Amino acid sequence: MKTILSIILTALSTFSLLAQYPSHVKKLKFKALEVKSTNNANTSNDALSRAVIKGNLNEGNTLSSLRFASYSSVACFPSTRNDRFDGNHVFYHFKLPAYSVANIKLFSDKDVSLYGYQVGTNNYIVAPDLNRCVTCEASYDGEITTGKKAQERMRFNSIKNEYNIVIAVAGAKKLKEGDFKLVVRLETNRPEDETIQDTKEASVTAIPTIKGEIKTLKGNLEVGKQIPLDWAQNSNVACFPGTRFESYRGNHVFYTLELPRYSKLKVTLLPKDRNANINIYGFSGHDGSTLPPDIHRCVSCEADYYSDDTGAKSINFMAINNPYKVLIAVAGGRDVLAGEYELKVELTDR
C-alpha cells in the first residue's frame, strides 16, 4: 500500500511540475495604467494595463515543424506562408481575464512575423505540439518599419472565461537574429449584459428534419432565459453588432438540427403578435452542446430583426461538401420574456 501511495504521490508531483509553461516561454509582466472613463452607458472600464518587452530573435530557436499552424483545429496560418515563420521563435505567455481584450503590436526593423493562440487555463501546450485551440491569430504581411508604426498586430478577446494566451515572435525567411519590441495592451470591460444572473436551464429542442418536408413548431419565450450578448459581435462569430443588442436582451429559446451535405435550410419565425419584438438568429458549425454566450467561433452566423408585413423573420444556411450542426435561437427584445411564436423549418436540396 505504501508503495502504491508513493507512486501516486510521485505522479501527482510530476503532473504539478508539468502544469506550467516551460522555461523558454516567458511570462509577460503588466503595469496598470490610468483607467479612462467611458461614455458608453452599457460598459464600465474595470482595468487597463500594458506590458512592454524588448527582445531579440537570437533568444529563441527554430521549430521542428510548422504543420500545427495549418491544422483545421488550429487554423493559424496556411502552409503556403511557412516562409514567414521558418526562423527563430521567441515565446511569451499571459492570462487573459474574463471580459477582456488584448491588443498586441510588434515593432521591428527586421523581417519578423507574429502569431498567438488562446487556450484554456489548464492548457500549457506550446507549438509545435499544439493540436487545437480556442482561436489562433497571425500577422505576417506588414511592411518592415522603424519608429512608432507597428509592423504586425493582432487581437484576442474573452467573454465569460479567462484564458491562457501564448504569443510568438518569429523570424521570416530563416531569420535567426534581430531586435524587436512587443507591446500588449490589456483592457477589461464588464458590459451591462454580463451582470445577468438567469439561473434557469436553457431550453433546447432538437428538430428532426427530412429533405423536402416543412417542419412547423410552436413555442413561447417564457421557457427561455436571458443571456449576455457580447459573444455575438466577436469577429469569429459576427452574428449581430452591439448596436442591435436591444433586439436580443429578452429570453432566448434554442433549437438544434442537422444540415446535410448539398442542402439549403430556411428557418422562418412568425410571432403570434406580428408587432411583438421577437427575433431570430442562428449559426452553423455548432458543436452539438455548447450554447451562447460560450460561443467563440462558427462557420457562419445569420440574424434577422427586421420583420416583413406579416411579422415574419427568416435566416438561411447552405452546406456544400460538408454537413453541419445548426443552432437556432428565438429571442425577445429588451424586457420581452414571454410571447408565442411559430417556427417553420424548410430543408431542401442545394
Image (spheres, rainbow, N blue to C red):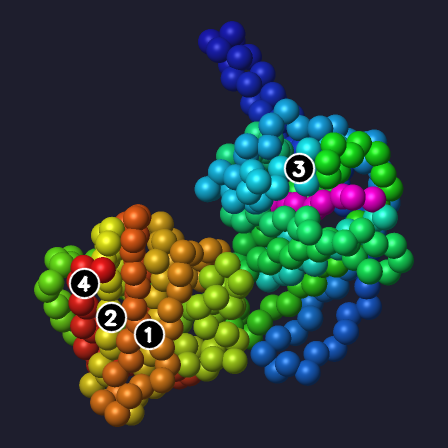
The residue at which mark 3 appears reads as 83
Along the viewing direction, whichever of 29 and 235 lies nearer the viewer? 235
Residue 132 is inside the magenta segment: no
Earlier in the chain: of badge 2 and badge 4, it is 2
Where residue 120 sits in the image (x, y, percent)? 55, 44
Q: Is residue 77 left or right of residue 224?
A: right
The residue at which mark 2 appears reads as 267
Where residue 143 sits in the image (x, y, percent)? 76, 54
Which tag is nearer the camera, tag 1 or tag 2?
2
Above or below, comparing residue 88 to residue 296 in the picture: above
Q: Amino acid at mark 3?
A: Asp
**How far is the residue under mark 2 from the one under mark 3?**
45 Å
Which tag is nearer the camera, tag 2 or tag 3?
3
What label does residue 203 carry, if any? none
Which tag is nearer the camera, tag 2 or tag 4?
4
Where residue 44 sits in the image (x, y, percent)? 65, 74
Could you tell me which secondary element the residue under label 3 belongs to? helix
Q: Are marks 1 and 4 in contact (CB under 8 Å)?
A: no
Q: Quadrant of residue 58?
A: top right
**How far is the residue under mark 1 from the one under mark 2?**
9 Å
Q: Are marks 4 and 3 in contact (CB under 8 Å)?
A: no
Q: Are marks 2 and 4 in contact (CB under 8 Å)?
A: no
> Which residue is located at x 44 percent, y 68 percent?
239
Q: Are marks 1 and 2 in contact (CB under 8 Å)?
A: yes
Q: Amino acid at mark 4?
A: Leu
What label does residue 347 carry, if any? 4
Q: Amino acid at mark 2?
A: Val
